[in-house]
Amino acid sequence: MIDRYSRDEMKAIWSEENKLRKWLEVERLALEAWAELGVVPKEAAKALREKANFDIERIKEIEETTRHDVIAFLTNVSEYVGEAARYLHWGLTSSDMLDTANAVIFKEALELIIEDVNLLMDAIKGRAFEHKDTVMIGRSHGIHAEPITFGLKLAIWYDEMKRHKERLAAAKERISYGKISGAVGTFANVDPRVEEYVCKRLGLTPAPASSQIIQRDRYAEVFCVLALLASSCEKIAVEVRHLQRTEVLEAEEWFRQGQKGSSAMPHKRNPILTENITGLSRLVRSYAAPALENVALWHERDISHSSVERVIGPDAFIAADFMLTRLKGVIERLIVYPERMKENLGLLNGLIFSQQVLLLLTQKGVSREDAYLIVQRNAMKVWEERRDSGGTAQYMTGKEGKGFKDYLLNDPDLLEHVTPQEIEEIFSLDYHLKHVDTIFKRVFFE
Protein backbone atom coordinates (compact mmCIF):
# COMPACT_ATOMS: atom_id res chain seq x y z
CA MET A 1 0.00 0.00 0.00
CA ILE A 2 2.82 2.39 0.81
CA ASP A 3 4.39 1.93 -2.61
CA ARG A 4 1.08 2.53 -4.35
CA TYR A 5 0.55 5.97 -2.87
CA SER A 6 4.11 7.27 -2.62
CA ARG A 7 5.46 9.87 -5.01
CA ASP A 8 6.80 8.57 -8.29
CA GLU A 9 10.09 10.40 -7.72
CA MET A 10 10.87 8.46 -4.54
CA LYS A 11 9.91 5.14 -6.08
CA ALA A 12 12.12 5.92 -9.07
CA ILE A 13 15.12 6.64 -6.85
CA TRP A 14 14.88 3.20 -5.26
CA SER A 15 14.11 1.34 -8.48
CA GLU A 16 16.35 -1.41 -9.79
CA GLU A 17 16.83 0.62 -12.96
CA ASN A 18 18.16 3.65 -11.10
CA LYS A 19 20.45 1.55 -8.92
CA LEU A 20 22.05 -0.10 -11.94
CA ARG A 21 22.35 3.25 -13.75
CA LYS A 22 24.27 4.56 -10.76
CA TRP A 23 26.50 1.48 -10.78
CA LEU A 24 27.23 1.99 -14.45
CA GLU A 25 28.06 5.66 -13.95
CA VAL A 26 30.59 4.85 -11.23
CA GLU A 27 32.25 2.32 -13.56
CA ARG A 28 32.32 4.83 -16.44
CA LEU A 29 33.85 7.55 -14.31
CA ALA A 30 36.44 5.22 -12.80
CA LEU A 31 37.57 4.13 -16.26
CA GLU A 32 37.68 7.76 -17.41
CA ALA A 33 39.93 8.55 -14.46
CA TRP A 34 42.26 5.68 -15.35
CA ALA A 35 42.36 6.92 -18.92
CA GLU A 36 43.20 10.45 -17.75
CA LEU A 37 46.08 8.97 -15.76
CA GLY A 38 47.32 7.09 -18.83
CA VAL A 39 46.86 3.66 -17.27
CA VAL A 40 44.23 2.41 -19.73
CA PRO A 41 43.59 3.46 -23.32
CA LYS A 42 41.29 6.44 -23.75
CA GLU A 43 39.51 4.46 -26.43
CA ALA A 44 38.42 2.00 -23.75
CA ALA A 45 36.88 4.76 -21.65
CA LYS A 46 35.22 6.16 -24.77
CA ALA A 47 33.79 2.74 -25.67
CA LEU A 48 32.37 2.30 -22.19
CA ARG A 49 30.78 5.74 -22.28
CA GLU A 50 29.20 5.16 -25.70
CA LYS A 51 28.32 1.46 -25.68
CA ALA A 52 27.79 0.40 -22.10
CA ASN A 53 24.30 -0.65 -21.13
CA PHE A 54 22.54 -3.44 -19.25
CA ASP A 55 19.44 -5.57 -19.31
CA ILE A 56 17.84 -6.37 -15.96
CA GLU A 57 16.43 -9.72 -17.06
CA ARG A 58 19.78 -10.74 -18.55
CA ILE A 59 21.52 -9.82 -15.27
CA LYS A 60 19.11 -12.03 -13.34
CA GLU A 61 19.80 -14.87 -15.76
CA ILE A 62 23.58 -14.54 -15.29
CA GLU A 63 23.21 -14.25 -11.52
CA GLU A 64 21.51 -17.65 -11.45
CA THR A 65 24.97 -19.03 -12.30
CA THR A 66 27.35 -16.55 -10.64
CA ARG A 67 25.34 -16.10 -7.43
CA HIS A 68 26.94 -12.63 -7.33
CA ASP A 69 24.94 -9.61 -8.43
CA VAL A 70 27.88 -7.32 -9.18
CA ILE A 71 29.66 -9.93 -11.31
CA ALA A 72 26.41 -10.60 -13.13
CA PHE A 73 26.04 -6.88 -13.79
CA LEU A 74 29.62 -6.51 -15.04
CA THR A 75 29.26 -9.56 -17.25
CA ASN A 76 26.15 -8.13 -18.85
CA VAL A 77 27.76 -4.72 -19.38
CA SER A 78 30.73 -6.44 -21.00
CA GLU A 79 28.40 -8.02 -23.52
CA TYR A 80 27.51 -4.53 -24.74
CA VAL A 81 31.03 -3.08 -24.65
CA GLY A 82 33.06 -5.83 -26.31
CA GLU A 83 36.88 -5.84 -26.29
CA ALA A 84 37.25 -2.71 -24.17
CA ALA A 85 35.38 -4.44 -21.33
CA ARG A 86 38.66 -6.00 -20.18
CA TYR A 87 39.38 -2.66 -18.51
CA LEU A 88 35.99 -2.55 -16.81
CA HIS A 89 36.12 -2.50 -12.98
CA TRP A 90 39.88 -1.95 -13.21
CA GLY A 91 41.44 -2.15 -9.72
CA LEU A 92 38.02 -1.87 -8.03
CA THR A 93 36.23 -4.09 -5.55
CA SER A 94 32.45 -4.48 -5.55
CA SER A 95 31.94 -2.13 -2.62
CA ASP A 96 33.82 0.66 -4.40
CA MET A 97 31.01 0.73 -6.89
CA LEU A 98 28.19 -0.20 -4.51
CA ASP A 99 28.90 2.26 -1.72
CA THR A 100 29.72 5.16 -4.03
CA ALA A 101 26.50 4.58 -5.97
CA ASN A 102 24.58 4.18 -2.72
CA ALA A 103 25.79 7.57 -1.55
CA VAL A 104 24.25 9.20 -4.61
CA ILE A 105 20.97 7.33 -4.11
CA PHE A 106 20.76 8.26 -0.42
CA LYS A 107 21.58 11.86 -1.24
CA GLU A 108 18.79 12.04 -3.83
CA ALA A 109 16.31 10.40 -1.46
CA LEU A 110 17.19 12.77 1.37
CA GLU A 111 16.71 15.76 -0.91
CA LEU A 112 13.14 14.59 -1.56
CA ILE A 113 12.50 14.07 2.16
CA ILE A 114 13.77 17.60 2.85
CA GLU A 115 11.41 18.87 0.16
CA ASP A 116 8.56 16.99 1.89
CA VAL A 117 9.44 18.61 5.21
CA ASN A 118 9.49 22.06 3.61
CA LEU A 119 6.01 21.52 2.20
CA LEU A 120 4.75 20.24 5.55
CA MET A 121 6.22 23.27 7.30
CA ASP A 122 4.48 25.59 4.85
CA ALA A 123 1.17 23.91 5.65
CA ILE A 124 1.75 24.14 9.41
CA LYS A 125 2.77 27.79 9.19
CA GLY A 126 -0.33 28.74 7.25
CA ARG A 127 -2.64 27.13 9.79
CA ALA A 128 -0.63 28.55 12.70
CA PHE A 129 -1.21 32.13 11.59
CA GLU A 130 -4.83 31.33 10.81
CA HIS A 131 -5.34 30.21 14.42
CA LYS A 132 -2.82 32.40 16.20
CA ASP A 133 -5.59 33.82 18.40
CA THR A 134 -7.91 30.80 18.49
CA VAL A 135 -8.10 30.16 22.24
CA MET A 136 -8.20 26.62 23.59
CA ILE A 137 -7.26 24.81 26.75
CA GLY A 138 -3.74 23.53 27.22
CA ARG A 139 -3.52 20.08 28.76
CA SER A 140 -0.96 18.29 30.89
CA HIS A 141 -1.44 14.62 31.77
CA GLY A 142 -4.55 14.90 29.59
CA ILE A 143 -6.10 17.23 32.19
CA HIS A 144 -6.97 20.89 31.68
CA ALA A 145 -4.04 23.13 32.59
CA GLU A 146 -4.07 26.75 31.37
CA PRO A 147 -5.23 28.53 28.18
CA ILE A 148 -3.18 28.49 24.99
CA THR A 149 -4.07 29.09 21.36
CA PHE A 150 -4.29 26.48 18.64
CA GLY A 151 -1.79 28.56 16.72
CA LEU A 152 0.75 28.10 19.50
CA LYS A 153 0.34 24.34 19.28
CA LEU A 154 1.06 24.54 15.56
CA ALA A 155 4.02 26.85 16.14
CA ILE A 156 5.62 24.17 18.31
CA TRP A 157 5.18 21.64 15.51
CA TYR A 158 6.74 24.06 13.03
CA ASP A 159 9.73 24.68 15.28
CA GLU A 160 10.23 20.95 15.69
CA MET A 161 10.22 20.43 11.94
CA LYS A 162 12.88 23.13 11.59
CA ARG A 163 15.16 20.99 13.74
CA HIS A 164 14.43 17.97 11.57
CA LYS A 165 15.42 19.97 8.49
CA GLU A 166 18.75 20.70 10.11
CA ARG A 167 19.23 17.03 11.02
CA LEU A 168 18.32 15.89 7.52
CA ALA A 169 20.75 18.36 5.97
CA ALA A 170 23.51 17.15 8.27
CA ALA A 171 22.70 13.52 7.50
CA LYS A 172 22.77 14.26 3.77
CA GLU A 173 26.22 15.79 4.13
CA ARG A 174 27.42 12.82 6.18
CA ILE A 175 26.16 10.20 3.73
CA SER A 176 27.53 12.00 0.65
CA TYR A 177 30.90 10.25 0.76
CA GLY A 178 32.27 7.81 -1.79
CA LYS A 179 35.20 5.41 -1.81
CA ILE A 180 37.28 3.89 -4.58
CA SER A 181 40.04 2.50 -2.37
CA GLY A 182 40.12 -1.19 -3.20
CA ALA A 183 39.55 -4.46 -1.38
CA VAL A 184 40.64 -3.31 2.10
CA GLY A 185 40.86 0.45 1.65
CA THR A 186 44.62 0.67 1.03
CA PHE A 187 44.52 1.84 -2.61
CA ALA A 188 46.85 -1.08 -3.40
CA ASN A 189 45.41 -1.53 -6.88
CA VAL A 190 43.77 1.83 -7.47
CA ASP A 191 45.17 5.34 -7.50
CA PRO A 192 43.61 7.75 -4.95
CA ARG A 193 43.20 10.19 -7.83
CA VAL A 194 40.62 7.84 -9.33
CA GLU A 195 38.55 8.17 -6.18
CA GLU A 196 38.86 11.95 -6.26
CA TYR A 197 37.82 12.08 -9.92
CA VAL A 198 34.77 9.85 -9.45
CA CYS A 199 33.55 11.54 -6.28
CA LYS A 200 33.94 15.05 -7.65
CA ARG A 201 31.80 14.28 -10.68
CA LEU A 202 29.13 12.62 -8.58
CA GLY A 203 28.94 15.50 -6.11
CA LEU A 204 30.47 13.42 -3.32
CA THR A 205 33.45 13.77 -1.01
CA PRO A 206 36.11 11.03 -0.85
CA ALA A 207 36.03 9.21 2.48
CA PRO A 208 39.20 10.21 4.38
CA ALA A 209 39.71 6.56 5.34
CA SER A 210 37.75 3.45 4.45
CA SER A 211 38.01 -0.29 4.73
CA GLN A 212 36.38 -2.29 1.96
CA ILE A 213 33.28 -0.20 2.63
CA ILE A 214 32.04 3.19 3.69
CA GLN A 215 31.64 2.95 7.45
CA ARG A 216 28.07 2.25 8.48
CA ASP A 217 27.81 4.88 11.18
CA ARG A 218 27.04 7.22 8.27
CA TYR A 219 24.09 5.06 7.22
CA ALA A 220 22.92 4.60 10.81
CA GLU A 221 22.76 8.37 11.27
CA VAL A 222 20.42 8.68 8.29
CA PHE A 223 18.01 6.07 9.63
CA CYS A 224 18.11 7.53 13.14
CA VAL A 225 17.22 10.94 11.73
CA LEU A 226 14.33 9.40 9.79
CA ALA A 227 13.22 7.69 13.02
CA LEU A 228 13.22 11.01 14.87
CA LEU A 229 11.27 12.63 12.07
CA ALA A 230 8.74 9.81 12.16
CA SER A 231 8.32 10.25 15.91
CA SER A 232 7.41 13.91 15.44
CA CYS A 233 4.94 12.99 12.72
CA GLU A 234 3.35 10.55 15.12
CA LYS A 235 3.26 13.22 17.82
CA ILE A 236 1.20 15.47 15.54
CA ALA A 237 -0.98 12.57 14.42
CA VAL A 238 -1.73 11.50 17.99
CA GLU A 239 -2.69 15.08 18.89
CA VAL A 240 -5.13 15.25 15.98
CA ARG A 241 -6.57 11.89 16.97
CA HIS A 242 -7.12 13.11 20.52
CA LEU A 243 -8.70 16.37 19.38
CA GLN A 244 -11.08 14.37 17.18
CA ARG A 245 -12.37 12.21 20.05
CA THR A 246 -16.12 12.66 20.44
CA GLU A 247 -15.72 13.97 23.99
CA VAL A 248 -13.21 16.59 22.82
CA LEU A 249 -14.03 17.33 19.15
CA GLU A 250 -11.94 20.49 18.87
CA ALA A 251 -10.58 19.48 15.46
CA GLU A 252 -10.97 16.60 13.05
CA GLU A 253 -9.72 15.21 9.79
CA TRP A 254 -11.54 16.30 6.67
CA PHE A 255 -14.24 13.77 5.79
CA ARG A 256 -14.65 13.29 2.06
CA GLN A 257 -18.09 13.21 0.41
CA GLY A 258 -19.04 9.55 0.09
CA GLN A 259 -16.39 8.39 2.56
CA LYS A 260 -17.41 5.62 4.96
CA GLY A 261 -16.22 5.33 8.54
CA SER A 262 -17.40 1.87 9.50
CA SER A 263 -18.83 -1.19 7.80
CA ALA A 264 -21.23 -1.63 10.73
CA MET A 265 -21.92 1.92 12.01
CA PRO A 266 -22.88 4.48 9.36
CA HIS A 267 -22.43 7.40 11.77
CA LYS A 268 -18.67 6.96 12.22
CA ARG A 269 -16.08 9.59 11.21
CA ASN A 270 -12.78 8.03 12.16
CA PRO A 271 -9.28 9.60 12.19
CA ILE A 272 -7.98 7.02 9.74
CA LEU A 273 -5.29 9.19 8.15
CA THR A 274 -3.58 10.04 11.41
CA GLU A 275 -3.97 6.47 12.64
CA ASN A 276 -2.20 5.42 9.45
CA ILE A 277 0.58 7.94 10.13
CA THR A 278 0.94 6.57 13.66
CA GLY A 279 1.40 3.08 12.29
CA LEU A 280 3.87 4.13 9.61
CA SER A 281 5.96 6.03 12.15
CA ARG A 282 6.40 2.80 14.09
CA LEU A 283 7.61 1.14 10.93
CA VAL A 284 10.10 3.89 10.06
CA ARG A 285 11.47 3.89 13.61
CA SER A 286 11.97 0.15 13.44
CA TYR A 287 14.52 0.56 10.64
CA ALA A 288 16.90 2.47 12.90
CA ALA A 289 17.72 -0.63 14.96
CA PRO A 290 19.09 -2.80 12.11
CA ALA A 291 20.97 0.22 10.73
CA LEU A 292 22.70 0.56 14.11
CA GLU A 293 23.44 -3.17 14.14
CA ASN A 294 25.15 -2.76 10.75
CA VAL A 295 27.87 -0.54 12.22
CA ALA A 296 29.74 -3.46 13.80
CA LEU A 297 31.01 -5.62 10.94
CA TRP A 298 33.84 -8.14 10.99
CA HIS A 299 37.28 -6.65 10.43
CA GLU A 300 37.42 -4.76 7.12
CA ARG A 301 33.94 -5.90 6.19
CA ASP A 302 31.47 -8.75 6.10
CA ILE A 303 28.26 -8.97 4.10
CA SER A 304 25.68 -9.04 6.92
CA HIS A 305 24.78 -5.39 6.31
CA SER A 306 23.94 -5.92 2.65
CA SER A 307 20.69 -7.84 3.06
CA VAL A 308 19.52 -5.35 5.68
CA GLU A 309 20.16 -2.30 3.50
CA ARG A 310 18.39 -3.79 0.50
CA VAL A 311 15.22 -3.75 2.61
CA ILE A 312 15.48 -0.77 4.94
CA GLY A 313 16.73 1.70 2.32
CA PRO A 314 13.73 1.73 -0.01
CA ASP A 315 11.22 0.84 2.70
CA ALA A 316 12.20 3.60 5.13
CA PHE A 317 12.40 6.33 2.52
CA ILE A 318 9.23 5.39 0.66
CA ALA A 319 7.31 5.10 3.93
CA ALA A 320 8.67 8.43 5.19
CA ASP A 321 7.83 10.15 1.90
CA PHE A 322 4.28 8.81 2.00
CA MET A 323 3.86 9.69 5.69
CA LEU A 324 5.02 13.29 5.26
CA THR A 325 2.82 13.81 2.21
CA ARG A 326 -0.18 12.42 4.03
CA LEU A 327 0.47 14.55 7.12
CA LYS A 328 0.70 17.67 4.97
CA GLY A 329 -2.74 16.89 3.59
CA VAL A 330 -4.14 16.36 7.08
CA ILE A 331 -2.86 19.74 8.25
CA GLU A 332 -4.08 21.59 5.18
CA ARG A 333 -7.60 20.17 5.41
CA LEU A 334 -7.91 19.93 9.18
CA ILE A 335 -11.33 21.11 10.37
CA VAL A 336 -11.02 23.29 13.47
CA TYR A 337 -13.89 24.09 15.86
CA PRO A 338 -13.12 27.32 17.79
CA GLU A 339 -16.52 27.36 19.52
CA ARG A 340 -15.99 23.84 20.82
CA MET A 341 -12.56 24.89 22.05
CA LYS A 342 -14.16 27.76 23.93
CA GLU A 343 -16.79 25.47 25.39
CA ASN A 344 -14.17 22.98 26.60
CA LEU A 345 -12.18 25.86 28.06
CA GLY A 346 -14.96 26.40 30.60
CA LEU A 347 -15.40 22.79 31.69
CA LEU A 348 -13.56 23.31 34.99
CA ASN A 349 -15.51 26.39 35.95
CA GLY A 350 -12.54 28.73 36.19
CA LEU A 351 -9.95 26.40 37.74
CA ILE A 352 -7.60 27.21 34.86
CA PHE A 353 -6.80 30.52 36.63
CA SER A 354 -5.62 28.86 39.87
CA GLN A 355 -1.93 29.64 39.41
CA GLN A 356 -2.64 33.36 39.15
CA VAL A 357 -4.47 33.24 42.49
CA LEU A 358 -1.53 31.37 44.01
CA LEU A 359 0.95 33.96 42.74
CA LEU A 360 -1.24 36.85 43.89
CA LEU A 361 -1.33 35.49 47.44
CA THR A 362 2.45 35.07 47.56
CA GLN A 363 2.84 38.66 46.34
CA LYS A 364 0.68 39.71 49.28
CA GLY A 365 3.09 38.09 51.75
CA VAL A 366 1.45 34.68 52.17
CA SER A 367 3.88 31.74 52.21
CA ARG A 368 3.71 29.53 49.14
CA GLU A 369 2.64 26.56 51.25
CA ASP A 370 -0.26 28.43 52.88
CA ALA A 371 -1.26 30.03 49.60
CA TYR A 372 -1.30 26.63 47.90
CA LEU A 373 -3.57 25.22 50.62
CA ILE A 374 -6.04 28.10 50.28
CA VAL A 375 -6.24 27.84 46.50
CA GLN A 376 -6.37 24.05 46.40
CA ARG A 377 -9.08 23.94 49.08
CA ASN A 378 -11.35 26.06 46.90
CA ALA A 379 -10.38 24.24 43.74
CA MET A 380 -11.34 20.87 45.22
CA LYS A 381 -14.84 22.22 45.94
CA VAL A 382 -15.21 22.93 42.23
CA TRP A 383 -14.04 19.42 41.35
CA GLU A 384 -16.56 17.95 43.76
CA GLU A 385 -19.38 20.16 42.51
CA ARG A 386 -18.55 19.27 38.94
CA ARG A 387 -18.61 15.59 39.85
CA ASP A 388 -21.98 15.91 41.60
CA SER A 389 -23.48 17.90 38.72
CA GLY A 390 -22.37 15.38 36.13
CA GLY A 391 -19.57 17.55 34.77
CA THR A 392 -21.67 20.51 33.66
CA ALA A 393 -19.55 23.52 32.74
CA GLN A 394 -20.47 26.90 34.23
CA TYR A 395 -17.59 29.26 33.61
CA MET A 396 -18.03 31.22 30.37
CA THR A 397 -21.22 29.29 29.53
CA GLY A 398 -23.79 31.45 31.31
CA LYS A 399 -25.07 28.59 33.43
CA GLU A 400 -26.03 29.13 37.04
CA GLY A 401 -24.06 27.69 39.93
CA LYS A 402 -20.82 28.27 41.78
CA GLY A 403 -17.54 28.39 39.96
CA PHE A 404 -14.01 28.79 41.22
CA LYS A 405 -14.31 32.56 41.40
CA ASP A 406 -17.47 32.28 43.53
CA TYR A 407 -15.73 30.12 46.09
CA LEU A 408 -12.73 32.43 46.21
CA LEU A 409 -14.92 35.48 46.79
CA ASN A 410 -16.49 33.71 49.77
CA ASP A 411 -13.28 32.52 51.40
CA PRO A 412 -12.50 34.74 54.43
CA ASP A 413 -8.91 33.47 54.69
CA LEU A 414 -8.22 34.59 51.14
CA LEU A 415 -10.04 37.90 51.51
CA GLU A 416 -7.76 38.83 54.42
CA HIS A 417 -5.03 39.32 51.81
CA VAL A 418 -6.68 40.25 48.50
CA THR A 419 -9.66 42.36 47.43
CA PRO A 420 -12.66 41.12 45.42
CA GLN A 421 -11.58 43.42 42.60
CA GLU A 422 -8.17 41.76 42.43
CA ILE A 423 -9.84 38.37 42.20
CA GLU A 424 -12.16 39.58 39.43
CA GLU A 425 -9.20 40.85 37.43
CA ILE A 426 -7.55 37.44 37.53
CA PHE A 427 -10.24 35.77 35.45
CA SER A 428 -9.09 37.09 32.07
CA LEU A 429 -7.76 35.14 29.12
CA ASP A 430 -5.67 38.10 28.00
CA TYR A 431 -3.24 37.47 30.85
CA HIS A 432 -2.34 34.05 29.42
CA LEU A 433 -2.08 35.12 25.80
CA LYS A 434 -0.13 38.37 26.10
CA HIS A 435 3.09 36.85 24.73
CA VAL A 436 1.67 34.96 21.76
CA ASP A 437 3.15 37.49 19.32
CA THR A 438 6.56 37.16 20.98
CA ILE A 439 6.50 33.38 20.54
CA PHE A 440 5.42 33.68 16.89
CA LYS A 441 8.24 36.12 16.25
CA ARG A 442 10.78 33.69 17.71
CA VAL A 443 9.48 30.74 15.72
CA PHE A 444 8.70 32.26 12.35
CA PHE A 445 10.89 35.35 12.04
CA GLU A 446 14.14 34.70 13.90
Image: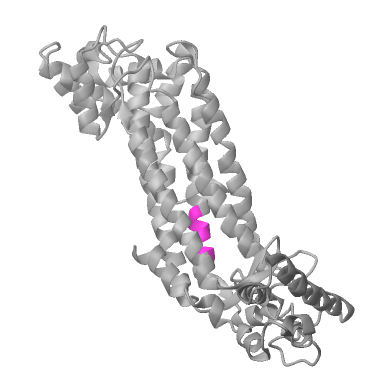
Q: Which x, y percent locates residue 239? A: 62, 62
Judged left or right of residue 374, residue 240 is left
Q: Which x, y percent locates residue 224? A: 50, 38
Front residue of this view, candidates 422 and 64: 422
Judged left or right of residue 120, residue 93 is left
Quarter of image, res 209: top left
Quarter of image, res 347: bottom right
Front residue of this view, candidates 393 and 368: 368
Outermost residue toward the top in this view = 188
Front residue of this view, candidates 311 and 57: 311
Residue 173 highlighted magenta (yes or no):
no
Residue 326 highlighted magenta (yes or no):
yes
Quarter occupied by the C terminus: bottom left
Front residue of this view, candidates 163 and 421: 421
- What's the residue at 70%, 60% (across, down)? 141
Placement of 121 over or under 172, stated as above or below: below
Q: Is residue 50 visible?
A: yes
Outermost residue toward the right in this view = 388
- What's the residue at 50%, 71% (across, down)? 151
Q: How is the image coloured?
A: one colour
Quarter of image, res 22: top left
- What's the residue at 59%, 55% (across, down)? 235
Q: Which x, y percent locates residue 429? A: 58, 81
* Segment colored magenta: 324-330
Task: Count the labels in the image.
Answer: 0
Judged left or right of residue 362, residue 405 is right
Q: Is residue 258 visible?
A: no
